[in-house]
Amino acid sequence: AKHVGVLALEVYFPGIYVSQDDLEVHDEVTQGKYTLGLGQRCMAFCGDQEDVVSMSLTAVHSLLEKYDVDPKSIGRLEVGTESALDRSKSIKTFLMMLFAEHGNHDIEGVDSLNACYGGTAALFNAVNWVESRAWDGRLAIVVATDIAMYAAGPARPSGGCGAIAMLIGPEAPLDLERGLCASHMEHAYDFYKPCGFYPLVDGKSSVACYLMALDRCYASLCEKFERQRQRAKSGNACTQSNGSPPGFSLADVDFCVLHSPFVKMVRKGFARLVYQDHLHAKSRSQARQDQAASRLKRRSSSSSATPAQQPLPLLAERGCGGAAAQTAADVLAEEEATRAGAASLDTYPADPDAFPAESYSDRGLERAAMAASGEAFSRMVQPGLTAAAECGNMYAASVHAGLASLIEAEGAALEGRRILMYSYGSGLAASLWSLIGRRIDGKFALGSVAAKLDIQGRLAGRRKADPAEFVATLELQERRHGEAGYKPERPLSDLRSGTYYLCEVDSLYRRTYARK
Ligand code: ACO
């Protein structure tokens, strides 16, 4: 199978939200802390009539319906989540209800778990299956579904919830670029769920882990890209006249979608990529200057020596510099950086061969990288942040909901473009990979997928809840955790037509669902 990737996708988020402005007042924090400080506008949350199973049932059913996909044409179904309701029974088995009624029980795949990374593991499994000898010609569906809730305190405003369902197959409009995927995985205790309802989270450490893993993935991806380019072009054809390779950078990318625990995190992550490009460019420039200097030395007797070469163009020339262009949802720390008089990134010639751990807490460097990346952020990242800013962290679904936001914003303009995707799951597992937009005809054309998403329309139709209702709902969910023998008390009026809901948890913890 060729051009295996995402054929279509559907996002689900609940019909109620709390505004982060209101939460700031309710939590008695300084104004702007959640909105400017974290970059969030609203947070989606759900009552006890919804859970991760109902949300994924809604997303999958809607995907099949919107694209008129025959349930019998599905041969693999994978789910990524960190909010499993049962330590044995996978969410995938609940979703089988949608296929069994059409006589299709022959569907491989179960659930993948690792914090916000499960959906990405599921995606890679599905793509690998379609590309493998095991493939039987049918399509795959990948689901990511999570409810992110934190105990009262600084992490609470970075919650959220939602689900996505992606249809995976050959000749896709979003083709996973094979060979251009880099992962970084290691043991860490930045965020985990050993027991109880809420996660244990070391917020500052999780932020540093996210950035460190992104650094590692990007460095590895750059190397892989270079090796690929070297292989593709024979000999030295791909090297510059002075012998140094051109190198992969953000100039090779059109859009970036980074896992969004909160928008400011994405802002910091993107600034980090720009910083890495800066280091690579500096290091190549230095190498060229060293070469030129040694040539000069060899010709030291000659008065007509060639002057040393100019340094490589740095950030501004690569489209990653310039004045920051603010947009409405901006979060952004450029203003803050300007106010604080951010230094130029050129004053940060850190050793490019080592990733300095201290650089993750270097505020001066962060401000400089933010200031240098403002325009590129608005152009390359902002279009994919709608769901993140409006719904909050969807955990496993977050990065894929970002892709959906980007598709809705750009549609057919993604054809021929490269999208860099970053998935991070605490604990930790991270991958950076690339999608190439392709022009195809029919219902899976990017323009048609964009038209069917209707994220903006559904966001506009949500009901705004006040913080007191939000907190009471969280307390209800806390009570429901591990409870048997109840019928949900929240009304169905908040659910859009076509939404699945939980009818009952019986005394043996068995859940039943229905569709509104
Ligand atoms: N106006 C504007 N900005 C403000 C204001 C204000 N009034 N008050 C604070 N800020 C800024 C701070 O300067 C800070 O910005 P900076 O990061 O650019 O310095 C930001 O708001 C956050 O404030 P802090 O006091 O630094 O952090 P806080 O203690 O509120 O916690 C944290 C933030 C750690 C992210 C917390 O929300 C958390 O633990 N979240 C869950 C963990 C998480 O999401 N980790 C990310 C990766 S792992 C994952 O995906 C789950």
Image (tube, rainbow, N blue to C red):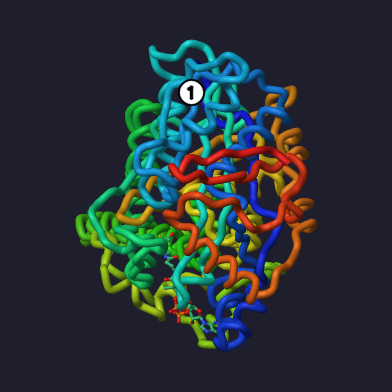
Q: Position of residue 287 (x, y in %)?
A: 29, 56
The residue indicated by pointer 1 is: 76
Q: For this rendering, which residue is in front, 108 or 440?
A: 108
Q: Is residue 104 visible?
A: yes
Q: Position of residue 3 (x, y in %)?
A: 53, 23
Task: Rate crowding at label 1 as few (under 14), some (14 to 19) or many (20 or more) other CA atoms within 10 Å.
Answer: many
Which part of the image, by quadrant, shows the C terminus?
A: top right
Say above or below: 350 vs 508. below
Q: For this rendering, which residue is in front, 409 or 232?
A: 409
Q: Residue at x 52, y 12 (%)?
A: 137
Q: Residue at x 27, y 62 (%)?
A: 189
Say above or below: 439 vs 159. above
Q: In which quadrant of the rendered view does residue 339 lie?
A: bottom right
Q: Secondary structure at mark 1?
A: strand
Q: For this rendering, which residue is in front, 482 or 161?
A: 482
**71 left or right of 351?**
right
Q: Residue at x 57, y 39 (%)?
A: 512
Residue at disc 1, CB closer than 8 Å to ligand 1: no
Say above or below: 241 vs 130. below
Q: Residue at x 33, y 44 (%)?
A: 183
Q: Position of residue 42 (x, y in %)?
A: 65, 67
Q: For this rendering, which residue is in front, 442 or 49?
A: 49
Say above or below: 269 vs 434. below
Q: Is residue 349 visible?
A: no
Total number of numbered labels?
A: 1
**191 left or right of 402?**
left
Residue type at the position of mark 1: Arg
Q: Position of residue 502 (x, y in %)?
A: 60, 45
